[in-house]
Image (spheres, helix red, strand yellow):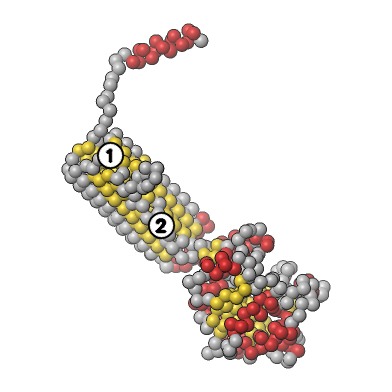
Amino acid sequence: MNPIATVILAAGKGTRMKSDLTKVLHPLLGVPMLFYTVDLSLNGIRAEKTIVVVGHQADQVERTFQDAPLDFVHQEEPLGTGHAVLQALPLLKGFTGTVLILCGDVPLVKKETLWSFIETFWRNDSTLAVLSAVVKDPSGYGRIVRDPEGWLERIVEERDASDEERLIREINTGIYCVRSSFLAEGLKEIGKENAQGEYYLTDLAEVARKRDLRCSAHMVANPIEVMGINTRLDLARAMDILRQEKLIELMLSGVTVIDPKTTYVDRAVIIGKDTTLHPNCTLQGKTRIGERCVIESNSKILDSELGCDVVIRSHSVITESRIEDEAVIGPFAHLRPQTEVKAKAKIGNFVEVKKSIIGRGTKANHLAYIGDSLVGEETNIGAGTITCNYDGVKKHQTVIGDQVFVGSNVELVAPVKVGNRSTIGAGTTVTRDVPDGALAISRVKQKNIKGWNKKKGFQREKKKKKG
């Protein structure tokens, strides 16, 4: 097979995005826009070499993709697409094969479409080929001009097009296949005598035709695949397309999505069969969800791992946490980073857990804060209980054993340990370790004042007369 090297154009700032962030790093379904093109090259086409041309915020782009097997080259000045590809030539020295040129801001292209394009290029024995599309409104795009036999004659940018050429609805997508043997020579011949004063990559077609070399245009079946992202509106449209594709993939694998229009699942999220996603839930990052789980409405889960038969009740927020089989979370629960909830445990409504392990079968049913804690198995955490883990300078750990009963409105002042099978009376402030099986209780002595209601009534009447 003819070897393939990919050059990805990702140097533009993206002025129309109105953003301080370079365009290709804007997120799409949890990953940077550029990820989709990079993934196509590395895993879809399996290119022998992948070169990314960077410019604006180049360092940030390189850091984002530092773990990927990519070569980066810099385009210091924005002098056009031809100039951008020229920067990649030193890294293509000695390469003999097909150079595939892709755009970092065209994330919807399918692997199958690219392979069809490449194979047609080979089959036609072309020197250069462009992927084209027929659109209703070609405004702003370069037009494809074909000769009487249908071969590509030239590509004309809109600013340089005649009135007749502007009526053409077949447009240039910016995706090319070029023989490596021609690319270097052809780039030397293009100039910048055009309306924008830039080196157009599109001029390669005319250079090739002057040499009587064959050029072709391969029309994509679905123009939406080659939609470029130039504005926030384009970004939202692409997001919706990718989101629906992800949900279709999940549903076909056995996941129930009650309302795909209001369900948000990032690209990297994995969900097991027979899990049900209710409307308005958001699953982000590297989240992994097992089988037969229920994620109720308005819950948000980020970079977390859920076992099987887990129930996340509505309005819960879970971040960088691990939840084992048959646990129940929420409603209105908040699991912060480094939280681990063991099997069959329950974290109920308005309970916040941070950097803690909650043991198997343990319950914190409502209105509690558990931070920097180790909680054993089959323990009960009463309503209003908090671990006082921060002394204003450092965080300290609370350790609660197995089968402990913690009453309501208890304060556990860390560092402190509560032994197995012990009991903490309601309203207690625990400042010292509690031995196994002991009862810890600390309360202010109750005082009853007789006749208080009558005394209050007398004071109200006295105040009323003065008024």
Outermost residue on the top side: it is: 465
Which residue does the image show at 29% across and 34% down from the upper left? 427
Which residue does the image show at 48% across and 71% down from the upper left? 67
- The amino acid pointed to by label 1 is Thr
- State the residue position of label 2: 320
Outermost residue on the left side: it is: 437
Which residue does the image show at 33% across and 47% down from the upper left? 396
Q: Residues within 10 Å of mark 1 (few under 14, many from 20)?
A: some
Residue situated in front as seen by the camera: 263 or 319: 319
Task: Examine the rendered structure and indicate whether residue 231 appears above or below residue 196.
Answer: above
189 vs 297, left or right, is right
- State the residue position of label 1: 431
Task: Examine the rendered structure and indicate whether residue 328 appears above or below residue 109.
Answer: above
* Residue 255 visible in the shown view: no
Residue 21: percent from the left, percent from the top?
A: 60, 61
Name the quadrant containing residue 421: top left
User: Regarding mark 1 in the picture, which secondary structure is present there?
Assistant: loop
Alpha carbon separation for disc pair 2 and 1 = 30 Å
